[in-house]
Image (tube, grey):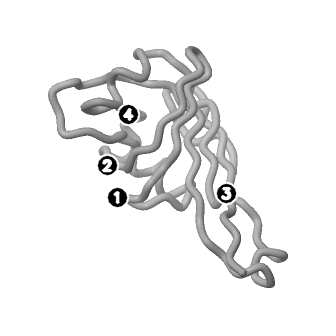
Amino acid sequence: MLRILCKSKIMNAFITSKEIDYSGSLGVDKAILDASDISAGEQVQVLNGNNGERFTTYVIEEKANSGKIVLYGPAARKGEPGDKLVILSYCLMETKESHNFSMRSIALGKNNQCKSK
């Protein structure tokens, strides 16, 4: 049997900007992607703590150490710069394998810089 598990969790992220005239997705600083084990193009669920919005999209890589978290296209309607986000990614895993699995969780600090793993 396959299980769906939360693979990666980015906490305390905040939106730095948004661009409505774009094909759509979520831009994330490459250093944050590397620390959280999320790849460009990977599906993520985004939870906005300021307005309660939850949406699914995919990730676009932003410049490393830029601190950028950008809502693009339709996703830009789901939040405002300064809103606090939680970003989640999931994976499918066999039940036996899932017993030894640990989710990667990171917290961001000032300017969306990685604070902890």
For marks 2 and 3, the one nearer the N-term is: 3
Q: What residue is pinned by disc 3?
A: 6
- Where is residue 2? Give x, y as percent: 68, 77
Residue contact between numbered discs 3 and 1, judged by CB atoms under 8 Å: no
CA separation in Å, label 2 and label 4: 11 Å
Residue 41: assigned label:
1
Q: Amino acid at mark 2?
A: Ile
Q: What residue is pinned by disc 4?
A: 68
For marks 3 and 4, the one nearer the N-term is: 3
Residue visible at 31% across and 44% down? 62
From this view, report whether residue 69 is shown above or below residue 17. Answer: below
Report helix, strand or loop for mark 3.
strand
From this view, report whether residue 96 is shown above or below residue 71. Answer: below
For marks 2 and 4, the one nearer the N-term is: 2
Q: What residue is pinned by disc 2?
A: 60
CA separation in Å, label 3 and label 1: 17 Å
Circle 2 Cα neighbour tier, 10 Å, few/some/many (<14 / 14–19 / ≥20) = many
For marks 2 and 1, the one nearer the N-term is: 1
**Which-is-in-front pick, marks 2 and 4?**
2
Q: Quadrant of the N terminus?
A: bottom right
Q: Amino acid at mark 1?
A: Gly
